[in-house]
Image (cartoon, rainbow, N blue to C red):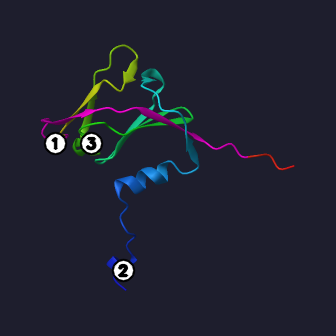
Amino acid sequence: MGVAADAKPRLTPEQKLEKALEGRVAGKPVNCIYMPRVINTRIYDKTAIVYEAGNTIWVNRPDSGASSLDDDDIMLTTPWGSQLCNVDIVRMIDRTVGFWRGSVGLGQFVPYTKVKAEKAS
């Protein structure tokens, strides 16, 4: 068998996001998140921006401009104060040449937390 036969199928960005959220449950969406708690940010191409803050993963599915999301680009945010809100605009910058590639209008932030295992009786 060749290498192609052994290759795993490529996951879509939506499938990658689902995999990252396995074992977590969605909470009530909010308009803003507190940025000093965010330790990591990931982009899922044309799908969502994920902000990791402690035990919570915040998922933002943009209201507009999601087609500009590319995990190879640099994300430039300019929040007012210490919160990033659904009224803020994210600008995408091409990593190679430094040109602006598009803008993303954020949606609400949905928190995902791990499901607590029930203790056996």
Q: Which kind of residue does numbered mark 3 sit on?
A: Ala
Disc 1/disc 2 C-alpha distance (Å): 33 Å
Q: Which one is earlier in the sequence, the residue at label 1 or at label 3?
A: 3
The residue that label 2 is drawn on is 5
Q: Which one is earlier in the sequence, the residue at label 3 or at label 2?
A: 2
Q: Can you say whether 60 is above or below 77 in the image? A: below
Q: Is residue 20 rendered to the left or right of residue 91?
A: right
Q: Which kind of residue does numbered mark 2 sit on?
A: Ala
96 magenta-colored: yes
Q: Position of residue 28 (x, y in %)?
A: 52, 33
Is disc 3 placed on a helix, strand or loop? helix
Q: Quadrant of residue 55?
A: top right
Image quadrant containing the N terminus: bottom left
The residue that label 3 is drawn on is 66
Q: Can you say whether 80 is above or below 85 in the image? A: above
Q: Dots 1 and 2: beta carbons under 8 Å?
A: no
69 magenta-colored: no
Per the rendered image, the range of residues in magenta is 95-117
Q: Nearer the viewer, mark 1 or mark 3?
A: 3
Is disc 2 placed on a helix, strand or loop? helix
